Image (cartoon, grey):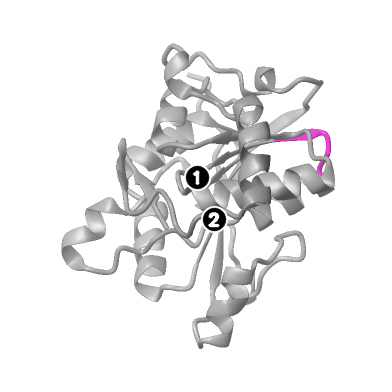
Amino acid sequence: MAKSFAGNLFGRRRGKPLRQGRLATLERLLPRLKIEPGNFAPRSIDPRSLFDRHIETVWLEIGFGAGEHLAALAKSNPQTGFIGCEPFMNGVARLLTDIDQQGLDNIRIVMDDASLLLDNLKCASIGAVFLLFPDPWPKRRHKKRRFIIPKNIAEIARVLGDGAQWRMATDNMDYCRWMLDHMTTAAEFQWLARRPGDWRIRPDNWPSTRYERKGIDKGRPPVFLTFQRCVRDPS
């Protein structure tokens, strides 16, 4: 799956040809739900303004895959708006099918690099961020492509409101160590885990996905890391 990194996209944009019904849904819904971050000035987007009705807060998922987690959250949190970033056409088409079948009106989609959106969001305008099972880029020469790098951490810290959570999941233990090394040294964030079960067991309000279950079946147990945006210094 294609993933984003600091202004560049790596990997595929398309997979298998879409079935006719799914293609028709994509062509019908995507123009209405798609956000083009390049149409906005830097740091100008109030994400609540992207929706057609009153939205209390907006949550962001980076690399939503097939969209199962995003659709589940949107259904259970109807007063929250959701922005999903995913450049992979097949994943977007799958999410649009769920949006259509479940009548979800609180999701918007960015089919591009998440950093393009982050650059244009207003400060403290996002209520939660999710980064679930990102590409671990396991080869040493490719690790610079990982999303968890200082530039992206700083941008997430800028757009998250005080006390808001950034949730991450991975089934790659090298990437888990990488996440912890980078996030526990970021002054803007606090890791909320207090005991092993806090990161080894998926929280009840964290919807599971087929990707997660497939990894467990193949002997790759996931970890679930939750970080909280620290309160900004008023000075």
Q: Where is residue 144 shown, x and y percent of the image? A: 23, 53
Which amino acid type is shown beneath numbered disc 2? Gly
Boundaries of the magenta span: 77-81
Residues at discs 2 and 1 in contact (Cβ within 8 Å): yes
Q: How many residues crowd around disc 1 within 10 Å: few (fewer than 14), some, or many (20 or more)?
A: many
Q: CA distance from mark 2 to mark 1?
A: 7 Å
Residue drawn at 19 percent across, 66 percent down:
140
Q: Earlier in the sequence, mark 2 or mark 1?
A: 2
Q: Is residue 80 a member of the stretch shown in magenta? A: yes
Disc number for residue 7:
none
The image quadrant of residue 58 is: top right
Using the image as rendered, state which of residue 233 and residue 165 is in the foreground. 165
Task: Please give left or right for residue 137 compared with residue 34 in the image.
Answer: left
Q: Is residue 171 above or below residue 77?
A: below
Q: Dot 1 lies on which element?
A: loop
Which residue is label 1 attached to? 86
Q: Where is residue 29 shown, x and y percent of the image? A: 67, 33
Using the image as rendered, state which of residue 233 and residue 35 is in the foreground. 35
Predominant secondary structure in magenta? loop
Which residue is label 2 attached to? 65
Residue drawn at 81 percent across, 21 percent down:
54
- Which quadrant is the N terminus positioned in? bottom left
Q: Dot 2 lies on which element?
A: loop
Q: Is residue 117 a member of the stretch shown in magenta? A: no
Q: Is residue 87 above or below residue 158?
A: below
Q: Where is residue 148 shown, x and y percent of the image? A: 37, 51
